[in-house]
Image (cartoon, rainbow, N blue to C red):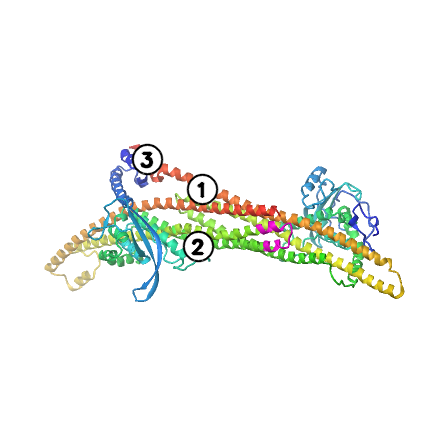
């Protein structure tokens, strides 16, 4: 085991569950797990190795929408570049991968919905926000605003890269077509019939059902996801208010620029110093625009994980549904078995209308009984098959989901730490600018 | 020009008005004593003479050398009085609250060190309250009408709005009073004023104030009843007046800007504090990220404290000086007006005298010549004070603006270091993790080593 562990490259070593550490059986499972994961990761990273991609541009288009009305929308240019020859697209795999194609936001949404439905046990990377939220006053909430479009472009690129670097998702054919087949992709995705599953997925998200024995890990995960959602929402909201206030502080200093200039006109010796100091005050006031613009990137990084929590929650809910169906199937089987016993022994343990009526109106004939028993046996057999299926489904779901959850946790910790570091760097840069401007002003004052 | 036995050797000190103030020697009620009276304030009323109230305290005047050192540090005020020739040092400090049945008020210790012969002793230490300063200022204005008297901080404060006994208010006021006395002490003419002398030295100022009050009314009436109107203000003084008006306006604008900045900073601070706590509450639900998030909360908190200091500085150091200069300008305008009146009186009298001479060959009375002298002295005094004031103004504003820049630099430096130390922590953790491979990696290592 040590050898296997040591032979894996550092980045691929997956996290493991602490409570199971000391079980022998665990080691066997681990070996298989490692092999499986190793394969998956290998497979996953291979797409990104072969195909470089980015969302390079955005453009406004006008056209007729589904209700035949003129609308303006933005399209984004996805550029791909293949390192290795031999990547072909098209249904027969005959045409080489094109370099670029245009997609609009709604198409990205469609792709994502497909992924959500097809891989319900995977935490699907989120898209950038549809409408600008958590804006501070100067920032535009308009979807066509160039700054918003630019930030969205970055967000969409990020989405594609996340999918392309996921061990499982990156191998999806539809995803590949999305990147390479401008016209044919839509038909291909509809052909998969994922739309049918959309409804059931929505049901699972909104339905309220009680699971008798909830999986503690999933419960904890759902709770964490809710807590993270709350924390980041709060953070984004207050950050916007802080940005507003900081903007105010800087801009008021611009007034110093004007008054120093006016004052310098009536002074002799002090005039020059005041005048130049005034210019520096103007510079100071103007500097806040760039500073806050840059901070929006930090907000975007946080937003991504805010939206990620929704994907996590969705996986938990799906698990709940599966668990629930399993419990229902088990319950149903138990009930049917009880019925069989009753019928066979003639005792009524469970209250049923039939039992009551037979008591009141006399017993059934032996023939009827045997017919019922046979039907019940059939039911039970089917029920046992169903239970087996559900068990399998649940087990597989839990395995795959938990693998992805661990991957996600590591990714989240890594990414958010990077985000915090870059935020600190932004703050330092802001401080340095401040020191620079005030030092310049101070020099002017000293020459007064 | 008639020369009068003016106090020490400055030709521009000029003639005093006729109904002069109390003769320096006649005003002394009792021998001046240097030591402060150590008595308990029994809450007596004004008639029995409140002592220059010290609360129960046995503080002796500061030792000679420390006083000297302290005073020397404040020599940034006047440009023309070089430190070597300065022979009078005054300091205001040590505010103390006095509670009596009648009222509550603050007194300040006024310490003097001097080698001048006009003072009997080389050192004095007395306690004064605001109304004593006010008295002094009025006396100076009346007795030295040709000179610019430095301003005092605002007398009246709205009782509901401002806490007269808060540390901040007292501190600010005390600094302004200190500045006031220093300016007077540095003035070549005002510093020799007997009222100033009495203020610095008298054990009991109140008895003298009582007598002084009677004469005060008469003097101010004199100037109002002048009744002469100036035809044209000479260009020189007109441009001074214009400058003062414009400058006053600019000061008002700067005052509003500074207040606005303080307000915006305060609102920013409120949001920033909440911002920091949100990081802390997020940290509580995280494992790996707990330390980094707490770190951010900590850095934000440091920035908050730095911001508090910055805002405080604007309120305590910057704004008071702006306001002081607004008062100074009013004072200067007053002096200009008085000068105008003086000139008007002369011109009026001269005109009348010339007419009379034309009529009946009466020679121009000596009075008219005296008036001319008065005007010339006034002009000379004013110009000298104007120059001095301009120098002071330049120095003061250079100082507070440089100070403002320094405080801002210091604020950003504090914030920068807070964020830089955070990065160190965050990045250390990163390299740490790369070798640890996370908490699970640690467990697995333990497992693998046990196999």
Residue that carries the numbered disc 2 in the rendered image? A237
What chain does mark 3 sit on? B
Residue B221: % across, % down: 79, 61
Which of pointers 1 and 3 lies earlier in the amino acid sequence? 1
Quadrant of residue A132 within the rendered picture: bottom left
- Viewer-side label of 2, 1: 1
What chain does mark 2 sit on? A
Per the rendered image, the range of residues in magenta is A259-276
Q: CA distance from mark 2 to mark 1?
A: 24 Å
What chain does mark 1 sit on? B
- Viewer-side label of 1, 3: 1
Q: Is residue A376 left or right of residue B32?
A: left
Label 1 crowd bin: few (<14), some (14–19), many (20+), radius 10 Å: many
Q: Visible in this render: residue B143?
A: no
Q: Is residue A262 magenta?
A: yes
Q: Visible in this render: residue B191?
A: yes
Instruction: Name the one closer to the observer, B51 or A283.
Output: A283
Numbered circle sitting on residue B445: 3
Q: Is residue A348 left or right of residue B233?
A: left
Label 3 crowd bin: few (<14), some (14–19), many (20+), radius 10 Å: some
Check contact, mark 2 vs mark 1: CB within 8 A: no
Quadrant of the drawing holding the N terminus of chain A: top left
Residue that carries the numbered disc 1 in the rendered image? B423
Q: CA distance from mark 1 to mark 3?
A: 29 Å
Instruction: Name the one closer to the observer, A245 or B239.
Output: B239
């Amino acid at each position: 085991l040590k050898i296997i562990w040591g032979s894996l490259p550092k980045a691929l070593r997956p996290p493991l569950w602490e409570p199971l550490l000391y079980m022998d059986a665990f080691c066997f499972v681990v070996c298989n797990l490692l092999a499986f994961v190793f394969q998956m990761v290998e497979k996953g990273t291979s797409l990104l190795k072969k195909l470089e991609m980015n969302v390079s541009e955005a453009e406004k288009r006008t056209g007729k929408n589904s209700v035949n009305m003129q609308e303006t929308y933005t399209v984004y240019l996805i550029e791909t570049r293949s390192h290795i020859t031999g990547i072909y697209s098209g249904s027969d795999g005959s045409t080489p991968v094109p370099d670029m194609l245009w997609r609009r936001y709604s198409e990205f949404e469609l792709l994502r919905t497909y992924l959500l439905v097809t891989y319900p046990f995977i935490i699907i990377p989120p898209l950038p926000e549809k409408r600008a939220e958590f804006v501070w006053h100067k920032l535009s909430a308009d979807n066509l605003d160039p700054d918003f479009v630019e930030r969205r472009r970055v967000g969409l690129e990020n989405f594609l890269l996340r999918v392309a670097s996921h061990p499982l998702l990156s191998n999806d054919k539809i995803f590949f077509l999305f990147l390479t087949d401008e016209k044919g992709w839509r038909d291909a995705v509809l052909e998969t019939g994922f739309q049918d599953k959309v409804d059931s997925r929505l049901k699972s998200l909104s339905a309220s059902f009680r699971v008798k024995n909830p999986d503690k890990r999933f419960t904890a995960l759902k709770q964490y996801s809710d807590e993270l959602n709350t924390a980041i929402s709060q953070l984004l909201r207050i950050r916007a208010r802080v940005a507003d206030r900081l903007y105010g502080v800087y801009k008021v200093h611009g007034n110093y620029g004007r008054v120093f200039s006016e004052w310098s006109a009536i002074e002799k010796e002090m005039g020059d110093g005041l005048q130049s100091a005034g210019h520096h005050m103007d510079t100071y006031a103007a500097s806040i625009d760039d500073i806050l613009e840059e901070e929006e990137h930090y907000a975007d990084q946080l937003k991504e994980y805010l939206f990620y929590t929704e994907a996590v929650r969705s996986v938990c809910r799906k698990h709940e549904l599966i668990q629930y169906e399993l419990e229902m199937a088990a319950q149903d089987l138990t009930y049917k078995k009880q019925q069989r016993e009753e019928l066979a022994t003639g005792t009524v343990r469970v209250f049923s209308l039939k039992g009551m009526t037979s008591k009141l109106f006399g017993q059934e004939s032996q023939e009827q009984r045997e017919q019922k028993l046979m039907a019940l046996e059939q039911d039970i057999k089917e029920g046992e098959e169903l239970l087996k299926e559900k068990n399998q489904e649940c087990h597989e779901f839990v395995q795959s989901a938990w693998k992805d959850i661990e991957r996600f946790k590591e990714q989240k910790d890594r990414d958010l730490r990077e985000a915090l570091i870059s935020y600190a760097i932004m703050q330092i840069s802001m401080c340095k600018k401040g020191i620079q401007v005030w030092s310049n002003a101070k020099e002017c004052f000293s020459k007064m | 020009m008639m020369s009068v036995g003016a106090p020490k050797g400055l030709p521009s000190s000029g003639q005093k008005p006729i109904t002069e103030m109390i003769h320096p020697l006649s005003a002394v009620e009792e021998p001046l004593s240097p030591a402060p009276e150590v008595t308990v304030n029994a809450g007596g009323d004004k008639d029995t003479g409140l002592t220059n109230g010290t609360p129960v305290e046995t503080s002796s005047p500061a030792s000679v050398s420390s006083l000297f050192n302290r005073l020397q540090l404040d020599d940034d005020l006047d440009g023309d009085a070089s430190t070597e020739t300065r022979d009078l040092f005054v300091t205001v400090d040590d505010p103390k609250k006095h509670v009596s049945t009648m009222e509550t008020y603050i007194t300040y210790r006024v310490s003097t060190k001097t080698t001048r012969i006009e003072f009997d002793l080389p050192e004095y230490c007395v306690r004064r309250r605001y109304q004593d300063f006010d008295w002094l200022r009025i006396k100076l204005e009346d007795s030295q009408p040709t000179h610019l008297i430095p301003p005092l901080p605002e007398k009246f404060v709205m009782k509901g709005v401002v806490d007269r006994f808060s540390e901040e208010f007292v501190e600010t006021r005390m600094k302004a009073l200190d500045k006031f006395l220093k300016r007077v002490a540095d003035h070549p003419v005002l510093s020799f004023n007997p009222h100033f002398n009495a203020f610095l030295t008298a054990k009991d100022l109140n008895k003298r104030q009582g007598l002084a009050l009677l004469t005060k009314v008469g003097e101010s009436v004199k100037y109002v009843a002048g009744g002469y109107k100036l035809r044209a203000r000479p260009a020189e003084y007109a441009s001074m007046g214009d400058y003062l008006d414009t400058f006053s306006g600019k000061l008002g604008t700067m005052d509003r800007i500074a207040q606005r900045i303080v307000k915006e900073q305060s609102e920013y601070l409120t949001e920033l504090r909440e911002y920091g706590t949100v990081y802390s509450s997020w940290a509580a639900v995280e494992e790996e990220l707990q330390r980094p998030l707490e770190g951010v909360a900590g850095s934000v908190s440091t920035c908050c404290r730095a911001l508090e200091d910055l805002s405080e500085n604007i309120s305590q150091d910057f704004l008071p000086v702006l306001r002081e200069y607004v008062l100074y300008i009013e004072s200067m305008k007053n002096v200009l007006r008085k000068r105008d009146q003086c000139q008007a009186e002369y011109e009026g009298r001269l005109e009348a005298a010339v007419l009379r001479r034309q009529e009946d060959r009466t020679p121009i009375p000596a009075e008219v010549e005296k008036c001319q002298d008065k005007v010339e002295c006034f002009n000379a005094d004013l110009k000298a004070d104007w120059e001095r004031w301009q120098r002071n103004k330049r120095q003061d504003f250079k100082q507070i603006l440089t100070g403002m820049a320094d405080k801002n630099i210091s604020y950003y430096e504090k914030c920068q270091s807070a964020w830089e130390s955070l990065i160190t922590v965050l990045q250390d953790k990163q390299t740490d993790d790369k070798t640890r491979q996370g908490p699970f990696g640690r467990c697995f290592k333990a497992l693998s080593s046990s196999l």
